[in-house]
Structures are given as C-alpha cells and as structure tokens.
Amino acid sequence: MEIYYLTSDQLYIRAYASYFEAQACKLMPYSEEANKTDGLILLLFSPFKCGKIRISPEQLWKKGLAIQTPNAVLLSAGFEEIRHPNYLDLLNLPSRFSEVLANSKRVSENWQPVYTGGIEMEDKLTRFFKGHGKDSLVGELTNIHGKISALRDAITEWKLSYETAAKEAFDSGYTWNHWAIFLTRWSYYYPLFQYTPFAKTMDNIHAAIKKVEPFFASKGLREELFMDTNCAETITYIQHTLNAIEKTYVEN
Amino acid sequence: MLKINYRILVVDDDFEFHKNLRLALREGYLFEGARDEFELRKKLNGKDTYDLILLDLDLHGNEDVTVGLNLIPELGEKFPDIPIIVITKESKISVVIEAINKGAKTYLHKKELDYKLWDKQFRTIIENRDLHKENIKLKQETAILKHQISQSYPFIGETTQVLEIKRTLTIVSEEPEITVLLTGETGTGKEVAARFLHQQGARRDGPFVGVNLSAIPKEMLESELFGHKKGSFTNAEFDKEGYFRQANGGVLLLDEIGDVNADIQIKLLRFLETRLIRPIGWDQDIQLDVQIVTATHRNLREEVASGNFREDLYQRLKAMVIYIPALRERREDIPLIIRHYLKQQSYDEQIIPPEVMAMLLNYHWPGNIRELVNSIRSMMMRRKILNRDAIDPECLPEEIRAFVPGTIVHHTENHAPIALTIPEGNHSLEEQQAILELRRIEASLIQYNGIKKDVAFALGYDKAGKSDNLNYCITSFYSKFPHLFSSFPVISKKYKRYIKPTDLL
C-alpha cells in the first residue's frame, strides 16, 4: 500500500520508514500527481517548520482534497497525545496500521482535523486575503490590476501611445505605493504556503510576480518591460488565481 | 462604429478608480464622479442627467456596506429612469443579493475587473433601460392614438334613444362573449356604436377591427377574414393573418353581414359555436377570443325567409339586437353633431345662422350622419369659395336648398318617404322644440302602426316617471300649443281622447 507524505523534515521519514515497511506500506513523497490516485492516503507530519515558525495546514488540506479526491484519507502525524481517528501519535504507534486506516474518516465526511500546535493556516490564509481591510494584499492587487488593465485597454482599444496612456495612468504615483505594499506582504506570506494544497499555484504566482517586478521597479518608465512581460495579462492571471484560491479555501 | 456617449455617474471614494474608468473606457462614455452620498445627491439634483449610476457599496472605505445599500431604494424612487450597477470588492453573495433586491440591476466585482466586459454590461443595461422607456412611450402613444380614434368616432347624441343605446351598449360591453347585431339605415353610425362598445368594455385594451364585408370581392372574402398559408392558392405569395386573428383579444365588426354568401355564413356560424377558425391551407384549427359585432342595413328576418341567410346563423347573431335610429328620428341631435364638427375644425357655431340651422333641421337626411358630416364639409368649402363670413343658404348642398320648406319627410321601414305638413309662421323656441318632438312621435306612430306602447319604448317614454310618459308629453304639448296638432293627424287620431277636433284647424 502506498502512503503519500508531506513533511518539512526528512528525519521523520528516515525514522519511521521501517515502521511503515513492517506494516506493508511504502512511503512516497506527495506531489499533485498523487491526487489522481484512487483512495489516496496522505500523511502530514505536522506541524511543519517554515523558517522559525511552525504551521498546521490540516484544515486547508481537508478542504482541498475534498474537492479534488473526496475518497482520500488525510492523516496527521505528530507527537501530541491526541486520540483521533485521523491522527497518528508517533510516540505511540499502533501495532496494526491497517486498523487506523479502517477507522479513519474520508475527507468528504464531516469531521474536524486535529490541531497540531502550529499556526492555523486556515486563519492565516483568511488574514492574507482579508487582513488590513480595504488595504489588504488583494485590495492592493485590485488597485494595481484596475490601473494596469486600464493602461492596456487605452493602448490596445483606443490606440493611445504608451507614453500618453502611462502618463495619464500613473500621474498620481499611487500605483507604485500599492505595488510596494503588495510585494512586502507577499514576501511575508509566500513561504508559509509551501505546505498547503495550493503551494504549486503559489509558486506560479510568485514566478509571475518576479516576471513583472522590473516593470514596477522602473515605475512604468520602460515601455518594453510593460510589453515584454505581458504585464496586464500577468497581473490579471495573479488576480484571478488568487481570487480562485480565496473562493475555494476562505469563502467555502 | 461610433458609439453613443452615455453619461455615467461613478460613486466611489477611490479617485484612482474614477481615473481608471476614464482611461479604459475613454470613448462612448462621459464619466462624472461622486465620492460619497452627499456629492451623489448634489450631482443628481443638478442640471445633468445620467444614463447609469455605478455605486460602490463600501462608500466610506470602512467595509460598511449599509450606506451604499440604503442608497439604492432612495435612488430608485427619486430617479427611476437611472439604472444602478453595484460595484464591490466584497464577494459576499448575501450583500449582492440584498443590493439586487433593493433595486440594483446587477453587480460588478472590482476583483474580477474586465473593462470590456464592464463596457458590455453598461451598454446592455442602459439599452435595456432605453427599450423599457421606449416601450412605455409606445404604450402612451398607443393610448393617445386610441383616444384620438375614439374622438374621431364620437357617439354624439343626447336624445332619449341615443342615451338608451349608449346605456345598453355599456351593459353589453361587460359581457365580452356576447354577439351583438346592430341594425339601422346606412350612415346612422353603426361602426361608431361598435367602437363605443369596444371602448367601454372588458376588451378595451384589445384591438378593434372593422370590416365592410360588402366591400371585399366574394372570392377573396374567406382569405381576408380567416387568413391563408403561403402557396395555398394561386397568388398566395405570403402568409396572411386575416381579420379574425388581427382582432384576437378584441372586437371584430362585420359590417353588412347580410351580404355574405352561404360558404362564409357556415364558417361564421362555426366560429360562433366553437371559437375556432381554420385559415386556408392550414391543417389545424386556431382558437380565438374575439367578440363579434355584426351590422346590416338589411332586414335579416326577411333575408332568412327568402332563403338568402341561414336561420341558425341569424339565431346566433340576434343574441343582442340594437337598432340605431335614423338621424331624422333624432333631429334634436343635429345641432349637437354640427357643433361637434364645427369645433373640430375650429369654427364658431355662430357661423351657422338660425335660418340655415332651421333648413338643416328640416332636411330628411336619407344618408344620415354620414350625409350630415359631408354636408358640413361642403358648406364650409362653399363658404370659402363664395367668400362669405357666415354660412348662408347658398352654401348649402343643392338637395338641402331644394328641399321644400314647411314639409318634413319621414322614411318608413321600406324607405318610402311620407310628407308631413308643419304649421307655418314664426314660432317660439319652446314651440319649435314641441314641433320637433311631435314630429318624432308622429313618425314613430306611423312606423309602429300606431302601437303606442312600441312608440313609447322606441322613444324612451316607457319609464315610470310622469315626465317620461308619452301620454303626459302629448297632453302637455296640447295644453300649451293646441293649434299645432292640426299638423299631426296620426297623433290627433290616436290621442283623440285628449285632443278636441275643434282645435284641429
């Protein structure tokens, strides 16, 4: 039986590989490809270490897997003394792992994952989207998106020169402030998302941000950066992708 | 393609948002900005008009949507012609639903911004608003047109007969299924009566279609009435709806019903029994909701007796028979009709002096109201040609001028004229009125073979009140103007109990 795992510390795998082998289970590192597996079993060694802080992303995983693979089994593993059908106490491992699996609940069922002691990532994600009110990270991005899309439409639809349209668009200078705030917040939150179900999507967003960053760094003076980076489309991609994550994991 | 410039009032505390809209949608729109509800009210109460309001619900930037939500019904009430689109950063569906329930047309998320999509949304909503306004305007125009048409066919008359006919038609109009047969001489206003029925009743909002059956060639009558399918016969190049379908939901007047052939009679009978018609070339029937009003100058009973009209159809048609009297049977209405048409053409009624009016009153009007209206037009034209200030006898049509004064002519049922002498000399107004009324009674006594009860009914004297009583009327006239009765031999004979022969000199 294959058991997919996710951990921030490979020591766990080395320490417990023999236990799972004895239970006729093979530990496999998790990737999104594994979501295609019928009857996916995902073991989260939680909490996860992200630099100096620890995070607990179980709630997000339960939501994410329930949409993609509703029959999946989500197990948390750690050193807490917790009795829960979907929790594996690493200091008190069951003699028959198959019994744990038999008693565990599927992600589509109604149950609450255990809290493993790290920062609750569901709360963190809500703060990522909603924190700071209208000046939230998404609020800042919305301002940037509105401006960059208007600039693009003025050039493509109304055939304004880049210089004329950019002058009109950026005369107040607010856009660069919005970008700076957005970038600061993103830099803080981005590492926290690496053990979430949408980590790969966040990596793609990060790459997109890096792609358009030179344009914003130039404060819009370099037309070629706007054009070459597909700035408007890239910002739209970032906005729409973040909207989709918010809808799935925060508003659902 | 050149777009119309619509004026949009953007209500949002974010000035950058205003600028972005102007930049992205720089052609086709004129954006005005208001940062809060106070500026919004100021703008709306100013001179400018707007085609759309874009309203940010979070007007004060504190995530409180209450102010924005409460503005929607207020704006809807004060400015019902300006649609509102709600702009929000908030994704809460409950807020959006509340905004739409309060009257917003739709909502747009700033987070899902797409100016091209917004452009389409703006235009769709504004153009729908325009269509809605156009629809209201058309409805108003239709109502005005209907009113104008009803003014073009006024049912003028204050004689007891006309008042009674109007009362009957009003009652009948409340029964939208009943078939009505209007009888009377040509030109008496049968179509006017039918239109009056339509305007009074339950079908007033439906169409009124009037067809003169005798004016349509026999071979085309079925197609004209019931319609046809393209190609169903030679020259049928298009589908034809037909008068019955045109009148669906309303009233269909079939004038000169006595002139239709046996085939059409069968189809009319079928419709009256089943409410179904089948257009030529169709393989199925159509159910229609049409009130049928028929009219004829013929005596249908005689047509049935002579085999020209189906008995069963006649029985169906005569569910409600209303006789429209000839103009000479209601001469008191002549001044009213003349006055109406003079007013319509902006003439003062003084343009017709008393002697001309007397000639018009004495004329026997074989063509009834139609002839009277044409005579008025002719008189006005001749007045201009002869360069007269007022109408004088020379302006009158030849037949009216030639009509022998002092003689009134009554037409019996078979249109044979009966001459009646009237007293000569000058008469007071009251005396003239008495003469006119006595003429009516005399004529009706002849028409109804001297049966007083029928005359009283026909002339509206059958009511219980003493003043409406025919006997009272005659004795009253006799007490005042006994000398007049020598000119009314039939009245004198029928009421010999009251009228002494010595007065008939």
Image (spheres, grey):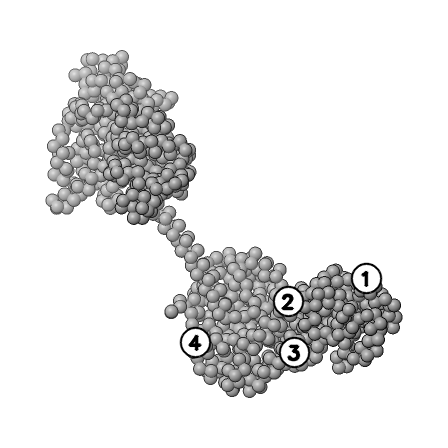
Is residue A2 shown left or right of residue B344? right
Q: Are marks 3 and 2 on the same chain?
A: yes
Mark positioned earlier in the residue sequence (3 or 2): 3
Q: Are marks 3 and 1 on the same chain?
A: yes
Examine the image and state in which quarter residue A13 appears.
Answer: bottom right
Quick check: A234 above or below B262?
A: below
Residue ID at (77%, 69%): A1
In 3D space, how far apart are the residues under numbered discs 4 and 3 (Cα atoms)? 35 Å
Quick check: B374 above or below B131?
A: above
Q: Which numbered disc covers residue A247?
A: 2
Mark positioned earlier in the residue sequence (4 or 3): 4
In 3D space, how far apart are the residues under numbered discs 4 and 1 (Cα atoms)? 64 Å
Helix, strand or loop status at disc 4: loop
In 3D space, how far apart are the residues under numbered discs 2 and 1 (Cα atoms)? 31 Å
Q: Amino acid at mark 3?
A: Asp
Subunit that carries the residue with mark 3:
A
Q: Amino acid at mark 4?
A: Trp
Mark positioned earlier in the residue sequence (4 or 1): 1
- From the viewer's perspective, is the residue at label 4 or at label 1 nearer? 1
Q: Which residue is mark 4?
A: A158
Q: Amino acid at mark 2?
A: Lys
Helix, strand or loop status at disc 3: helix
Point out the image quarter for the N terminus of chain B.
Answer: bottom left
Q: Which residue is mark 3?
A: A203
Q: Nearer the viewer, residue B56 or A78?
A: A78
In 3D space, how far apart are the residues under numbered discs 2 and 4 (Cα atoms)? 34 Å
Q: Amino acid at mark 1?
A: Asn
Q: Position of residue B60 (x, y in %)?
A: 59, 69
Mark positioned earlier in the residue sequence (2 or 1): 1
Subunit that carries the residue with mark 1:
A
